[in-house]
Image: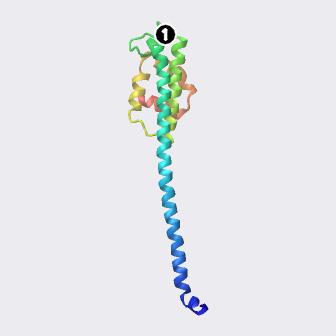
Amino acid sequence: MGQWLAENLVEIFTIVFGSGLWFTAFSIHKDGQARKEETKTRKAANLLAITANHREIWKEFLDNPKLERVRDAVVDTAGQPVTNAEHVFVTLIILHTNSVYYVMKDELVVEYEGIRRDIAQFFSLPVPNTVWRKSKPLQNQDFAAFVDDSLK
């Protein structure tokens, strides 16, 4: 037996080592697939959370007649200044947009391709634009640049 082992040691070592490499490669592949699925699941959960937050913010708009001017394109904010209720509501939108921006930037959610158009449509309205200009200095520079670039 000892002689046979000595004569076949190279072959035995090759089989054992090759099997170990194959098992390691298989494990790494399976782990990678599991991580991809986990990432997809996390992105979907994040998207659902963003959607729920978006819905909650806009429910406030629908339930509050004091916010009617927020989506009015012809409001004169110089003649009729932004109210506290409007300011708070638009600030919630800014905070929500900020969160979405950073989640997208970190690739933690599927990118919303129309976000720049959405930002431009909302923040170009008189009330949101007035609140944005006042709030912009309080924002991170990269987020402020993102919103401003969207408005162009």
Q: Residues within 10 Å of mark 1 (few under 14, many from 20)?
A: few
Give the residue furthest to the right. 2
Q: Position of residue 126 (x, y in %)?
A: 43, 16
Image quadrant where one finds the N terminus? bottom right
Q: Position of residue 71 (x, y in %)?
A: 42, 16
Give the residue furthest to the top. 79
Element under disc 1? helix
Foreground of the two, 71 or 63: 63
**Residue 110 picture quarter:** top left
Residue at left offset 45%, top offset 16%? 62
Residue at left offset 49%, top offset 56%? 32
Foreground of the two, 133 or 86: 86
Q: Position of residue 112 (x, y in %)?
A: 41, 35
- Which residue bears the numbered disc 1? 66
Amino acid type at circle 1 is Lys
Q: Is 25 drawn above or below residue 150 in the view shown? A: below
